[in-house]
């Protein structure tokens, strides 16, 4: 079993970062199991999807941050429409770029939670949490907008629930520009839905050129993660990526 690299600063000033992407289904399942899973993964950044939107969304996002030892970086409100970014206190937020997406009548509102951050001595990078549409046409348009969350020349990471399989047109379009983390550095499990019978990979972490993916996958192989908690925390499995950011 491959041992995951620890997060921290390397001698040359590069930063190793743990990023967790997790659809929490509006905190409707076993919240304590969810908190245990997140804490066991020891993430520096958490890209949350389906953060509660309709009943005290700010308070529930704050609850999740507090219980997981993180703070809210961006999202969690009406603009991001579900996605949320959490991070350790050591994460410096340089800019917030949350975005409400064009909406097709009769479908759910969707958005991106995006922040430009720096951790330690790393170069600044842009991180986006997203949850794309179930409608194929709308989803394809949303895929096309994701690279625009980062400006030209910026390092970027995009993580989320894409509601599409890796052979889909939107996924393929994004994978042509960004690295698909689990393909580049496979670790742990592959499929993310559903926990009781993981049969499809619809969650992913993508990284722009310049970001080194050291490992990416469902944390079945992480000793501190209880398999029983993975089954009861929510209706997706989490995706943990270990990334190396160059020095700033």
Image (spheres, rainbow, N blue to C red):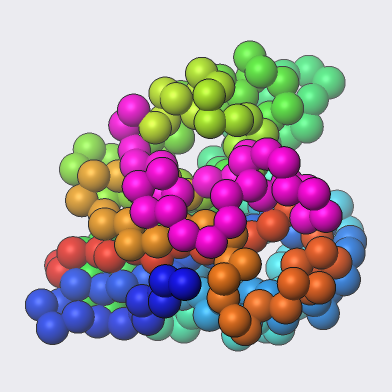
Asked whether the viewer can see residue 154, the reply is no
Q: Nearer the viewer, residue 34 or 182?
A: 182
Tell me which residue sits at (41%, 30%) in the image. Answer: 174
In the picture, the quarter occupied by the C terminus is bottom left
Asked whether the viewer can see residue 42, the reply is yes
Is residue 122 highlighted in magenta? no
Q: Position of residue 177 (x, y in %)?
A: 31, 31
Left or right for 192, reference 194 = left
Residue that lies at the very extreme toward the top in this rendered image: 137
Q: What's drawn in magenta, residue-wise?
A: 176-204
**Looking at the image, residue 38 lies above or below residue 137:** below
Tell me which residue sits at (51%, 18%) in the image. Answer: 169
Residue that lies at the very extreme toward the front in this rendered image: 1
Is residue 201 highlighted in magenta? yes
**Looking at the image, residue 50 lies above or below residue 144:** below
Residue that lies at the very extreme toward the left in this rendered image: 12
Left or right for 178, reference 152 = right
**Looking at the image, residue 109 lies above or below residue 128:** above
Q: Position of residue 36 (x, y in %)?
A: 72, 81
Q: Position of residue 217 (x, y in %)?
A: 52, 57
Q: Nearer the viewer, residue 219 or 132?
A: 219
Q: Position of residue 243 (x, y in %)?
A: 34, 63
Q: Main secondary structure of the magenta part?
A: loop
Left or right for 54, reference 74 = right
Tell me which residue sits at (48%, 79%) in the image. Answer: 88
């Amino acid at each position: 079993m491959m041992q995951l690299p620890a997060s921290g600063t390397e001698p040359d000033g590069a930063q190793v970062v743990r990023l967790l992407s997790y659809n929490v289904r509006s905190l409707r399942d076993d919240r304590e199991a969810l908190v245990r899973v997140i804490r066991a993964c020891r993430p520096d950044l958490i890209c949350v999807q389906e953060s509660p939107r309709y009943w005290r969304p700010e308070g529930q996002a704050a609850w999740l941050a507090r219980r997981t030892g993180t703070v809210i970086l961006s999202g969690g409100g009406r603009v991001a429409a579900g996605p949320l970014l959490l991070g350790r206190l050591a994460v410096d937020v340089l800019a917030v770029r949350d975005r409400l997406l064009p909406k097709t009548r009769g479908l759910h509102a969707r958005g991106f939670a995006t922040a430009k951050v720096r951790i330690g001595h790393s170069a600044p990078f842009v991180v986006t949490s997203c949850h794309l549409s179930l409608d194929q046409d709308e989803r394809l348009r949303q895929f096309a907008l994701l690279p625009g969350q980062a400006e030209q020349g910026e390092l970027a990471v995009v993580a989320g629930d894409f509601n599409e399989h890796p052979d889909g047109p939107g996924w393929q379009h994004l994978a042509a520009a960004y690295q698909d983390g689990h393909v580049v550095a496979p670790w742990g499990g592959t499929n993310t839905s559903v926990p009781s019978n993981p049969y499809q990979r619809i969650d992913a972490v993508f990284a722009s050129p310049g970001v080194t993916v050291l490992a990416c996958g469902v944390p079945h192989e992480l000793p501190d993660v209880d398999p029983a908690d993975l089954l009861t925390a929510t209706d997706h499995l989490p995706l943990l990526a270990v990334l190396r950011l160059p020095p700033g």
